[in-house]
Image (cartoon, grey):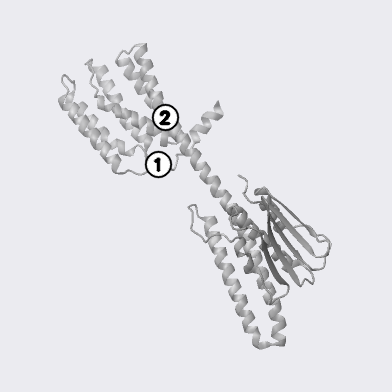
């Protein structure tokens, strides 16, 4: 029990309280007019001028109910408590206005938008004011029960809306976290691919500079272009990872973009083959196939010994899509897998598929992924 109360006491104020809008001004204006009309026209009202002024003083307090809910409750219900004290000390009849029932809105706002500490303090103050009012009015058990139920109804209603808002915010944070994980994986794949291309160009530049110095400028220009593109993509993804709100960014690459990875003017040459209907894949599957092929190609360029050809083959087989990336390089003893292969396997598993990697039956290295056409939930 102590732990529960401690968590309620420390619970922060929700961040979804909307600012004062036009509707709020209209409602406060309607309340002020109603309170003034009742204070002037109600016959036999004791302490009429004071009661009317207190009711009108409650109108601006309604503007604070979201930004400063505890202050609004203390001031608004403080007016109600003051009327009870006056009634008790002056032994006069009922001096309250029906329009002052608006203080129930303040109680709702306290539970809906107040922090844990504010809720505890505010509800305790309201309970004390209500108990005083019932004592002054000599309320019977039926009246006391009905009044308590009414107060609890407002508290429960506010708690329900607060819970729903908190649940929605948690879901949005979870979605953002999942998007950030996906973007972090995309960042790794993109950087690894482009840096590998830069390394290959630099190695070729070293050879070209000694044999054909006039072509060295072309190699340097290609390296500069690749580095600039890598830096731009990194900045875009890092900005999305750092910002809370959604940031517009270019659509993810998919199977249709795989032919752009093909090349015949470099070593190893890259061949891309697409078979079957690959145009209506689920977006996560489409993006994953491209990234898996890109990462496999990057690994082949970086690690395959004496490879002259890398083949990327994608084919539709019923309800699954099979990706196969193979090279003709020299097979080396298996080393400890890094984060690249681990991330590829995780990406496939998240979509309900599988990924295998190892030496091919005819030499070289083969990466094979099987993904369902429709991604799992």
Q: Position of residue 267 (x, y in %)?
A: 73, 75
Please tell me in which quadrant of the rendered image residue 219 appears: bottom right
Please tell me in which quadrant of the rendered image residue 317 appears: bottom right
Between marks 2 and 1, how big is the CA–CA gap? 16 Å
SS under mark 1: loop
| Label 1, residues with CA under 10 Å away: few <14, some 14-19, many ≥20 | some
Circles 2 and 1: CB atoms closer than 8 Å? no
Q: Position of residue 374 (x, y in %)?
A: 62, 49
Residue at the (69%, 73%) spot, across then down: 200
Question: Mark 2 = which residue?
Answer: 157
Q: Is residue 191 left or right of residue 330?
A: left
Q: Earlier in the sequence, mark 2 or mark 1?
A: 1
Question: Mark 1 = which residue?
Answer: 17
Numbered disc in front, either 2 or 1: 2
Q: Residue at the top extreme?
A: 140
Does 353 appear above or below 128?
below
Does 64 appear above or below 290?
above
Q: Position of residue 228 (x, y in %)?
A: 57, 71
SS under mark 2: helix
Does 280 appear above or below 302?
above
Residue at the (18%, 29%) spot, across then down: 37
Q: Image quadrant for the N terminus?
A: top right
Please tell me in which quadrant of the rendered image residue 312 appears: bottom right
């Amino acid at each position: 029990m102590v732990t529960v109360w401690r968590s309620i006491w420390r619970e922060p104020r929700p961040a979804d309280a909307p600012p004062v809008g036009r509707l709020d001004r209209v409602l406060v204006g309607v309340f002020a007019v109603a309170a003034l009309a009742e204070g002037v026209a109600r016959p036999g009202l004791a302490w009429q001028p004071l009661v009317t002024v207190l009711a009108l003083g409650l109108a601006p307090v309604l503007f604070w109910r979201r930004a400063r809910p505890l202050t609004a409750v203390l001031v608004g219900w403080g007016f109600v408590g003051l009327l009870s004290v006056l009634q008790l000390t002056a032994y006069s009849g009922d001096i309250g206005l029906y329009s002052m029932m608006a203080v129930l809105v303040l109680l709702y706002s306290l539970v809906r938008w107040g922090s844990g500490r504010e809720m505890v303090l505010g509800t305790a103050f309201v309970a004390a004011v209500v108990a005083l009012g019932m004592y002054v009015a000599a309320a019977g058990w039926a009246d006391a029960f009905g009044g308590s139920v009414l107060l609890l109804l407002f508290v429960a209603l506010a708690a329900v809306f607060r819970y729903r808002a908190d649940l929605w915010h948690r879901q949005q944070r979870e979605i953002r976290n999942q998007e950030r994980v996906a973007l972090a994986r995309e960042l790794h794949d993109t950087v690894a691919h482009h840096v590998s291309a830069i390394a290959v160009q630099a190695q070729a530049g070293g050879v070209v500079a000694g044999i054909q110095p006039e072509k060295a400028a072309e190699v340097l220009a290609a390296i500069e272009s690749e580095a600039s593109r890598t830096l731009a993509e990194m900045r875009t993804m890092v900005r999305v990872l750092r910002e809370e709100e959604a940031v517009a960014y270019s659509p993810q690459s998919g199977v249709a973009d795989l032919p752009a990875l093909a090349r015949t003017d470099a070593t190893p040459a890259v061949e891309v083959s697409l078979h079957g209907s690959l145009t209506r894949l689920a977006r996560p599957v489409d993006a994953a196939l491209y990234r898996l092929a890109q990462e496999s190609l990057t690994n082949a360029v970086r690690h395959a010994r004496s490879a002259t050809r890398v083949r990327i083959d994608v084919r539709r087989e019923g309800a699954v899509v099979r990706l196969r990336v193979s090279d003709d390089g020299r097979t080396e003893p298996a080393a400890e897998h890094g984060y690249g292969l681990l991330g590829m396997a995780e990406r496939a598993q998240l979509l309900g598929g599988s990924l295998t990697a190892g030496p091919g039956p005819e030499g070289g290295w083969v990466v094979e992924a099987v993904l369902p056409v429709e991604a799992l939930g």
